[in-house]
Image: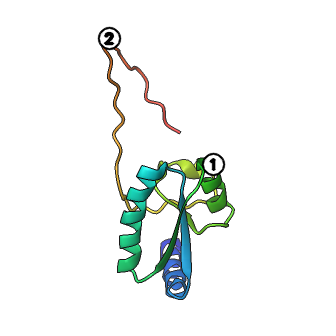
């Protein structure tokens, strides 16, 4: 029942959102923000929604989205809502980053740290 209620609320929100501009921010640097803006803008065009995309300092972007100043935050790690509880994760991947370590020495990594 909760699932159906959530879907209904999102549907109603999207119907109302067609009349307004949604502000999505990111804390990434200029190059990554330009890439995200291109991807997100395309999705908003397809959904016939207006977008105001902002590139802000990292912490400010998260705080604005968490406090409702902005409508959303783009491209964050999956568990960021544990730190910012008002951010709701939407499972729509827009990109994926693999982090690797390069070294001249043989390094053994024993533990995987996650938030």
Q: How is the image coloured?
A: rainbow
Q: Tag 1's secondary structure?
A: helix
The residue positioned 45% from the left and 55% from the top of the image is 33
In front of the other: 53 or 83: 53
How many discs appear? 2
The quarter holding residue 110 reads: top left
In front of the other: 115 or 97: 97
The residue positioned 35% from the left and 26% from the top of the image is 101
Q: Which mark is residue 59?
A: 1
The residue positioned 36% from the left and 64% from the top of the image is 39
Q: CA distance from mark 1 to mark 2?
A: 35 Å
Q: Which mark is residue 20?
A: none
The quarter holding residue 112 reads: top left
User: Does 47 sit above or below residue 85?
Assistant: below
Q: Tag 2's secondary structure?
A: loop
In front of the other: 13 or 63: 63
Query: Residue 23 in the image: x percent, y percent?
Result: 56, 70
Q: Residue furthest front?
A: 30
Q: Residue furthest top?
A: 105
In front of the other: 48 or 108: 48
Pick whichever of labels 1 and 2 is earlier in the sequence: 1
Return the residue at label 2: 105
User: Does 40 sit above or below residue 75?
Assistant: below
Query: Residue 86 in the image: x percent, y percent?
Result: 64, 60
Q: Does residue 80 appear to the left or right of 37 in the view shown?
A: right
Q: Does residue 110 appear to the left or right of 74 in the view shown?
A: left
Query: Residue 25 in the image: x percent, y percent?
Result: 55, 61
Query: Residue 77 in the image: x percent, y percent?
Result: 48, 48
């Amino acid at each position: 029942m909760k699932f159906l209620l959530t879907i209904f609320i999102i549907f109603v929100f999207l119907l109302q959102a067609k009349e307004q501009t949604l502000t999505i921010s990111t804390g990434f640097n200029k190059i990554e923000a330009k890439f995200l803006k291109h991807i997100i803008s395309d999705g908003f065009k397809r959904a016939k929604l207006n977008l105001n995309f902002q590139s802000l300092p990292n912490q400010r972007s998260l705080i604005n989205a968490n406090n409702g100043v902005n409508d959303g935050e783009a491209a964050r790690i999956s568990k960021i809502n544990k730190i910012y509880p008002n951010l709701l994760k939407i499972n729509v991947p827009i990109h994926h980053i693999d982090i690797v370590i390069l070294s001249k020495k043989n390094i053994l990594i024993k533990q995987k740290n996650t938030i």
